Image: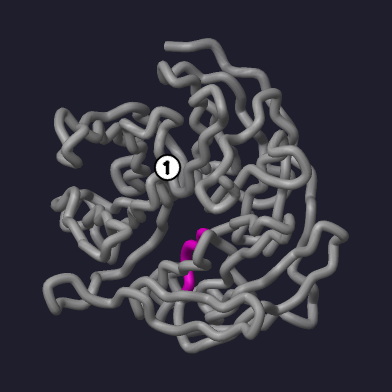
Amino acid sequence: MYAPPPIIETEVFATVPARFRRPGFRSEWTEVMRHGAPTDCFLEGPSFDRDGNLYVCDIPFGRIFRFAPDGTFSLAAEYDGEPCGLKFRKALITDFVHGVMELDPATGTVRPFLQRYLLQRFRGVNDLVFADNGDLYFTDQGQSGIHDPTGRLFRLRPDGRLELVLGNVPSPNGLVLNPEQNELYLAITRGNCVWRVPLMKDGQIAKVGIFIQLSGSLAGPDGLAIDEAGNLAIAHAGLGVVWLFSRLGEPLFRIQSRTGLVQTNLAYGWPDRHWLYVTESDTGNILRARLPTPGRTMYSHQP
């Protein structure tokens, strides 16, 4: 339908040091999600704080790593959980086992923040994003898919109201809001597509549809990020690329992995938001690429 877009090569920004890797590790998570393959780390959920530190999650080991702007690597937290996503102003973590957790970066303490909906445990929360007004959207993916379209999208209001926005979703994963804050883009991993979710002024939704239909890969779209022009970056896990589409859904760039095929998540950040950072989960690397349009300022970095 479209000509192949120009290629942007990535570079390796950082890698998990050998002292923090655990070769040969097997767990319930690796048995299901990695088909039993031993895993020494599995990175997800990149997010920058106000000081330019990049935090990433290590799902099977319940760890949060921190990469400082000068390249210093440290363990920010370790706990009994499976962290997938992370966002600041409060440092909130989506944890597949426990629900939404809260991290204290100063002490490394991780404590429960939100664990139930109508007294029921979540099925397996995955990713999260803040709107400009402080609303928190997060996905409850569990093991849903085309065979079992029971994934969900939730919204937590600043006053504490928890609302079910979408149900019966086949594997909801990464999510991001457009610059006007009237549409939410939602990665549907098992459907290999990205949905557009219009947000009405009264908070309701209407006319949810497919924005991008992808093809190929060993997995599907995972993390999403947006720039100031409304261009959407999609981590296409299992294909070794990140796609950049215009706000009209036209392909602009193919951002090529330097190592590995499993690009899971994205964050624009330091030093000027022209850099897009990508977690490459198979190799334990963080890749980055410089793009022409800066990423949109996240809620956590706004005044």
Q: Determine whether, in the image, residue 80 is placed left or right of residue 181.
A: right
| Closer to the camera in the image, 251 or 53 | 53
Q: Which residue is mark 1?
A: 176
Q: Determine the residue positioned at 59% across, 75% down.
A: 39
Is 182 located above or below residue 149 in the figure? Answer: above
The image quarter containing residue 22 is bottom right
Residue at x 41%, y 16% (from the top left corner): 248
Is residue 193 visible in the rendered structure shown here? Answer: no
In the rendered image, which quarter is residue 255 located in?
Answer: top right
- Per the rendered image, the range of residues in magenta is 83-87
54 to 119, vertically: above or below:
above
Q: Secondary structure at mark 1?
A: strand
Identify the residue at horizontal 73%, vertical 55% (top origin).
52
Can you name the residue that lies furthest to the right here?
70
Left or right: where does residue 271 sit relative to residue 89? right
Residue most extreme to the bottom:
80
**Residue 175 against residue 59 in the figure, above or below:** above
x, y percent for residue 26 = 52, 84
In the rendered structure, the answer to whether residue 101 lies left or right of residue 110 reads left
